Image: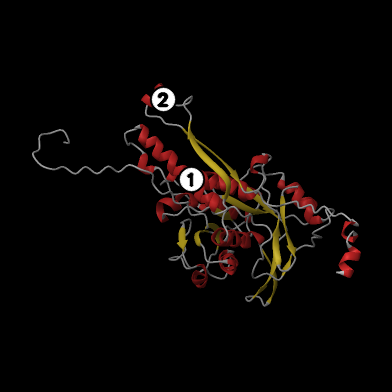
Amino acid sequence: MADEYHHGVRVLEINEGTRPIRTVSTAVVGLVCTADDADPAMFPLDTPVLLTSVQGAIGKAGDTGTLAASLQAIADQTQPATVVVRVAKGATDAETTSNLIGTTTEAGKYTGMKALLAAKTRLKVTPRILGVPGLDTLPVATALTAIAQQLRGFAYVSASGCKTKEEAVAYRENFGARETMVIWPDFEQWSTASNATVTAPAVARALGLRAKIDKDTGWHKTLSNIPVNGVTGISADVFWDLQNPATDANYLNSNEVTTLINADGFRFWGSRTCTEDPLFAFENYTRTAQVLADTMAEAHMWAMDKPMHPSLVRDIIEGINAKFRELVAGGYLIGGSAWYDEEVNSATTLKAGKLYIDYDYTPVPPLEDLTLRQRITDRYLADFASRINS
């Protein structure tokens, strides 16, 4: 006890002051696939498995189903931490769909894509870049959106079964979440298994490219207009021209469908989510909100249950503002600040052990529409003679 009698010297550690805040990891892929001949020890059914070397795991991913091809598509872009859930292929497509969506067993085990929810507890990572390449029919895609919302992740889904741009736009109307991006059409690639060009789900490439962008640039950069590795073509004709708004690509983008183009390499073209809320119209707006929410919350475990002196509140606010300055300096945000609002922090709430800290931020908008205003003038002829005779 600090107040008991002692004839000597005491040392009391005063652990006050701001704490550094570490940004949560975002380049973590969550992949749900089938592969009946995969190594069951490496990829047990309905169990999240963490891969730190995607390329190295392909040899045990089997030849059937979607697992090996999806891992290769990701590895072509980068080598991210990847959480894989392998599900059994059903006797029918409907049964496979049910296996992909999953459930909770009587023993409490999560199956299918729901097993991604157990990744943090089992593997100490949270998958945030989610996809079910080649198998994301509408029921699967809508279920994946729900998983993305629970994980504060983002779901990349295909316009499943759509043959035309009009069908893709109509398909997009099935979604309304800021955590979802619809992609149409797919890529093509050379298959070493069949020695032929085959259709390659664009979603698999989106997962790998998103992780690569997170690593190399940051979560404030959208998926759009970055070269994609390992593909040779696009599965449907898409008319695109950088200067012409009357194109297939512009039609798709204007209806919140991300498409594919070939311009100095194959690329995703489009940055919009499926929400009607303009605050989260862009992919990076949603991901910025998610990253900030998790980063700020997870960083303050240390403050829980400490005596709530004014100094503690100041330390929390100063720590958040220091993180905002770091993110602004790094180009991740335009601005951000935290403050203490006296109106919401009444004596009653403070007495109950409740503290409210407000903060706001401005995400970095992607340059989607650039207008160059060109003029013709004769003012550069005014000194024509002097330039000749000088």
- The residue labelled by disc 1 is 294
- In this rendering, does residue 223 appear at all? yes
Where, quadrant-wise, is the C terminus in this rendering?
bottom right
User: Closer to the camera, 78 or 121?
Assistant: 78
Residue extending farthest to the top is 348
Tally of numbered discs: 2
User: Closer to the camera, 190 or 63?
Assistant: 190
Image height of 71 relative to 340, above or below: below
Image coordinates of residue 210 in percent, x first then y, are 59, 58
Q: What amino acid does circle 1 point to?
A: Asp
Q: Left or right: where does residue 2 sit relative to residue 349?
A: left
First of labels 2, 1 by sequence position:
1
Are dots 2 and 1 in contact, CB under 8 Å?
A: no
Q: Which mark is residue 334?
A: none
Q: Residue 200 falls in which quadrant of the image?
A: bottom right
Q: Left or right: where does residue 240 sit relative to residue 3?
A: right
Image coordinates of residue 274 in percent, x first then y, are 67, 45
Where, quadrant-wise, is the N terminus in this rendering?
top left
